[in-house]
Image (cartoon, grey):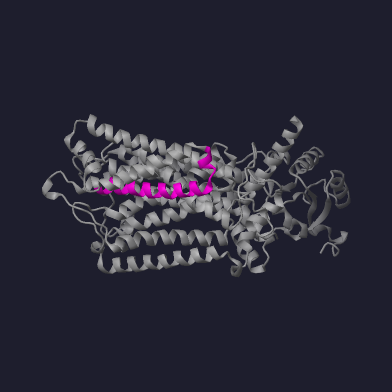
Amino acid sequence: MREELQLSELPEIHGAMAEFDTPEELLEACERAYSAGFRSMDAYAPMPVTGLAEAIGYKRNKVGLCVLIAGICGAIGGFSLLEWITVVAYPHNVGGRPLNSWPQYIPITFECMVLLAGLTALFSMLAMNGLPQPYHPVFNVPEFERASIDKFFLCIESSDPKFSVNETTDFLRDLGAKEVTIVPA
Amino acid sequence: MATTENLDSKELIDPGPDRILGTGHDYETVTDRIAGIVYLPWKRSPRKWLVGAFISFVFVNLLMLATGLLFFKGIGIWGVNIPIGWGFAIVNFVWWIGIGHAGTLISAILFLLKQDWRTSINRFSEAMTLFAVACAGMFPILHLGRPWLAYWLFPYPNSMWLWPQPRSPLEWDVFAVSTYGTISLVFWYCGLIPDFASMRDNAPHLWQRKIYGIFSLGWRGSAIHWHRYQKAYLLLAGLATPLVLSVHTVVSFDFAISIIPGWHTTIFPPYFVAGAIYSGFAMVLTLIIPLRAWYNMRDLITLRHIDAAAKLMLGTGLIVAYGYSMEAFFSWYSGDKYESFMYWNRVTGPYGVCYALLILCNIALPQLLWFRQVRHNVLVVWLLSLVINCGMWLERFEIVVTSLHRDFLPSSWGMYIPTKWDWATYTGTLGFFLFLIFLFVRMLPSISIFEVREVVHHDRYMERAYEEKL
């Protein structure tokens, strides 16, 4: 597949991808690429690597905020539902207790909070990651199969203003990459 | 792809201080080893797996028979009566849900406490949680009498404009158990996504790659994705931790909020939670000890894991023992004659044998776990885990039956004798649970691959640090 690629096909290039053997090498390469001025890039690893996302300039993780909002909504929603049932929709004297016996609504309020917050944790993470995504150019690189097993990759994308096929490829080689591949879009 | 034959089959491997896995693992070998179990052709499944799966499938059929008859004839086929209206259905409900709790403890609480050893057993325990909750959830619904109306338990706008009673712990149960089941599933699936991606990339057949590919949702291991993923996973762990405590607390409220002697105590919530974790760890060990032998995973689930689980079992067992002694103490100290009669009856009454067995199984025998030699003898730990499973079941039986069978008025006293359909339903859910476990180990990675890769990295780091120290 790589042989077919010519420089004339430049607009259809997703980026240049470098392969590394260890997480430490990848982390160092990312830091150097970032300080060299590259911004549009992504690193791929078969496991979470501490500091990797920060090394390529990622700052704001909004999953926590989404979960907080969902949790608050869940708690308010659950509690209001119970209040509405017992006070408005179906007022019902149970053993002389007041209609608004709110301490007894706490368990369900808590469960609703956890339910909504937990579902939001998964789905907001997936949504922000753009998953499910059936196609992505990085999978065009045959070696990328190992990205989910034991190899570590850095891909500088062609959308970066500093990107140029030859220079970026040389730059990645200088970073100590085992192999550098052009990623077709 | 490595198969499981050419592996070190040394019986017991202690990985040594600061190490979690056996020696000689790298990122690729752990992937091949764990995923290799799933890729093994069905024809080459271990004979023990085939026998086990077959026997448990027989019991699945027994369950279907028992529930079929129950739907046809009603709960009269069970031994429940007045005054013992709860019987096996609630005994088994509480027992199963308790078993599920160790799974959440391992995956969430130990994750928050940064206990790295959990990585080898968390996936498996989460699966156990999910299947145990499925078994647990079945019982209250079967017990409804008209199970097809189970949806009445949920608040939904209906033509009768009737709403469930949110002041009742039984309604809290509906929310607690359904939330628990949902969040356990979410947590489990969230952990599986990166492993599905690994299997999409190295499964031997195209059809396997396609199936795992669909479930991996196109995961590609991007650093930014991992960052969000870890945040989501951490938050899920943080949510699951209070959730697991709340679920068994609510289950204990089913009893404690009532005014039945022996149920109406404040010790119930913590004592139930400890008992749940106790029985759950027993079930983890019951399942994982044969599994690691059959699939030769002794270097991934090492003696260190078994030792740690045994210690946790001992610890929670002591909390349970404290619960028993407080129960006895307060029945005397309260000065309430119904309370003290209930306790005296529990020990010396018609179900006294159960109580003696319960003390033997839950308090006396587990004390052997104080000894290192016992904890390091896999067979003895396995037998003790079985004993504790029985003991915890007896505990639930004691709580439900002995408190109910002596009503306030002697004219309303009764006895509960489980019928063969009680036993068929109970053993049927055991078969259902085990059958799901058998399918799980063949179809999904039973150890979290990406987390074990992190452990490999950690072990290497520790090794280097150790060498530098020398």
Quadrant assignment, res B143:
bottom left
Query: Number of numbered discs present?
Result: 0
Say which of A170 and B248 sits in front: B248
Q: Main secondary structure of the magenta part?
A: helix
Residue A52 lies in the magenta stretch: no
Above or below, B300 against A37 in this view is below
Query: Is any part of residue B384 visible from this angle?
Result: yes
Say which of B148 and B228 sits in front: B148
Quadrant assignment, res A145:
bottom right
Residue drawn 33% across the image and 68% down it: B68
Query: Is any part of residue B225 visible from this angle?
Result: no
The quadrant of the rendering that contains the C terminus of chain B is top right
Residue B389 lies in the magenta stretch: yes
> x%, y% of residue B169?
30, 45
Q: Left or right? Give the position of B430 relative to B257.
A: right
Check the image and name the residue furthest to the front: B373
> x%, y% of residue B338?
18, 38
Residue drawn 53% across the image and 63% down it: B48
Residue drawn 51% across the image and 61% down it: B438
> x%, y% of residue B311?
49, 38
Q: Left or right? Give the position of B245 relative to A184.
A: left
Say which of A123 and B138 sits in front: B138
> x%, y% of residue B163?
28, 52
The quadrant of the rendering that contains the N terminus of chain B is bottom right
Q: Left or right? Give the position of B362 relative to A154.
A: left
Above or below, B338 against B80 in this view is above
Part of the protein shown in magenta: B372-401
Q: Left or right? Give the position of B242 relative to A59.
A: left
